[in-house]
Image (cartoon, rainbow, N blue to C red):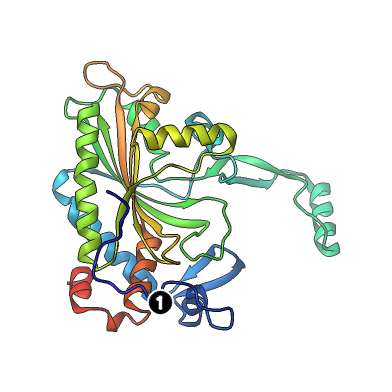
Amino acid sequence: MDGTFSHDVAFEDLDEPPASTPTFLDRLFDQGLLVRTGVDGLYGRSGAFESVVDAVDRMISGIGAGDGAEVMRFPPGMSRAVFERSGYLKSFPNLAGTVHSFCGHEADHAGLLACLDAGEDWTGDQAATDIVLTPAACYPLYPLAAERGALPAEGRLFDLQSYCFRREPSLEPTRMQMFRMREYVRMGSPEQVLAFRESWLARGEAMIRDLRLPLAIDVANDPFFGRAGRMLANNQRAQGLKFELNVPVNSLDKPTACLSFNYHQDHFGTTWELRQADGAVAHTACVGFGMERITLALLRHHGLDLTAWPESVRARLWG
């Protein structure tokens, strides 16, 4: 886990071309794999793109099939009250997205229409609802698990997926504002959850190697906000709480985290009063898969024509 990329894949075309030639994002648009919406980081996906996402999803399911995880799928919105209690706003206020709606009366509606006709701001009568956009697939899970009472002695394991939102508009195709996250979440004792994370570090590396992608696993930190966030990030790295599996997609200098392996210690256990069978606060860990990022890595390294991909990769994805 020294951050050195490994695999027999050429890197010559990974640096962005001169301004006169199309970028990787331009080529994805030109090929119809991604569809412009007029907002950076918010894209439609073609059937070909989705076929890769679906194949990667099946591959992940196959790897974890023998573990007995409980499957849950969440919508892209979650409870505002749960979101506030989770502590997300303390660490990532700049990434959060809320859902607002018109809450006025008929006269207010007339004012809204007048603003629209005049090309002026029409959002003044919008107010926050009890829904926020889901920032990570696991956030809605913890209070639901806590409501069940103490964990069994063997702990619990969940298989999750959700569309997620993070407000960081970018022209890097790997940095989408709305994207899918697949997760396995382990709850139990420190020993149980750390063993889970170590297992998935090995599984994740094997998975990406099977797809013939270059990779490096390195210690990492979450993008905590502000001056206090820098201290949190340093502590997270020093304790080895987060690892990322990186694949160069946009360039060699800025590899993309396609998988993350996170040990939350007792943060969510304390927040949600989640207990082990013996009454001790539960610890949690997760492995997260960026579904669009893995798909983009495959397209970058194997080409935009799926039929021309290496036979071993096609066999691994589609059988």
Residue placed most toward the observer, 164 or 28: 28
Percent position of residue 292, x then y: 40, 62
**Residue 49 or residue 100, whichever sits in front:** 49
Residue 55 lies in quadrant: bottom left
Marks counted in the figure total: 1
Q: Position of residue 127 (x, y in %)?
A: 69, 42
Q: Identify the residue at the far top of this view.
A: 279
Looking at the rendered image, the quarter that the C terminus falls into is bottom left
Q: Is residue 43 left or right of residue 161?
A: right
User: Which of these two is toward me, 294 or 45?
Assistant: 294
Task: Give the answer, above or below, for where 186 lies relative to 174.
Answer: above
Which residue occupies 44% across, 62% down? 253
Residue 53 percent across, percent down from the top left = 34, 65
Q: Which residue position is annotated with label 1?
A: 13
Question: Is residue 92 rendered to the left or right of residue 1?
Answer: right
Is residue 57 found left or right of 111 in the rendered image? left
Please tell me which residue is depicted at 36% across the width and 67% down the height of the picture.
297
Q: Nearer the viewer, residue 224 or 296?
A: 224
- Regarding mark 1 in the picture, which secondary structure is present there? loop
| Residue occupying image coordinates x 76% and y 44% | 104
- Badge 1: few (under 14), some or many (20 or more) residues near its Cα, within 10 Å? some
Amino acid type assigned to the residue bearing label 1 in the image: Asp
Residue 243 in the image: state x and y as whole percent.
33, 45
Q: Quadrant of residue 220?
A: top left
